[in-house]
Amino acid sequence: MGDFNYPNINWLQQTVEDNINADCKDFFNCCNDCFLTQHVSQGTRDNAILDLVFSSEPELVSNVKIIDNLGNSDHNMVTFSIQHEQKHLSTNRQIRDYNKGNYQSIREELQKINWNTFMSGDTDE
């Protein structure tokens, strides 16, 4: 989005005046070659559409509105909404604080195990 200052592009009819400079035609052709959609359909400086909003997907931009100018600017402001999908990842991850562990109780529980019986046999058993 921005102020591109190409008043000789008719964005509603998707045309460029024939007798215009090469920069204007190149810009228009580049936008078309890149399959960009221009969303502003009303004049942003008098009747000229100079302030543009582009997207690579037509559905990404909606609710384009031209509102009053800001301060001393001779361009009107453009507001619009961007449609996007946001996935909220549930991160209920438990983080243990090992500094608060009751290591004495752990030692006492481990001492109650008969390790000779517990560790007898082989890995298949």
Image (tube, helix red, strand yellow):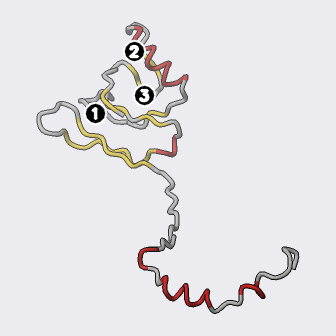
- In the picture as drawn, the residue positioned furthest to the front comes out as 116
Amino acid type, mark 1: Thr
8 over 120 or under it: above or below: above
Q: Earlier in the sequence, mark 2 or mark 3?
A: 3
User: Which tag is nearer the camera, tag 2 or tag 3?
Assistant: 2
Circle 2 residue: 24
On residue 44, which mark appears? 1
Q: Using the numbered discs, state the Cα–Cα distance from disc 2 to disc 3 in whole angstroms.
A: 12 Å
User: Which tag is nearer the camera, tag 1 or tag 2?
Assistant: 2
Q: Earlier in the sequence, mark 1 or mark 3?
A: 3
x, y percentage for residue 47? 28, 29
x, y percentage for residue 78? 30, 40
**Rendered-image quadrant of the C terminus:** bottom right
Circle 3 SS class:
loop
Classify mark 1: residues with Cα within 10 Å, few (<14), some (14-19) or many (20+).
many
- Tell me the quarter of the picture where residue 118 sits: bottom right
Q: Nearer the viewer, residue 69 or 117?
A: 117
Amino acid type, mark 3: Trp
Q: Earlier in the sequence, mark 1 or mark 2?
A: 2
Query: Left or right of 117: which side holds 31?
Result: left
- In the picture as drawn, the residue positioned furthest to the right comes out as 124
Circle 1 SS class:
loop
Q: Using the numbered discs, state the Cα–Cα distance from disc 1 to disc 3 in whole angstroms.
A: 12 Å
x, y percentage for residue 41? 38, 36
On residue 11, which mark appears? 3
Amino acid type, mark 2: Cys
124 over 77 or under it: above or below: below
Circle 2 SS class:
helix
Query: Left or right of 43: which side holds 98?
Result: right
Count of numbered labels shown in the rendering = 3
x, y percentage for residue 99? 42, 74
Residue depicted at 33% across the width and 24% down the height: 4
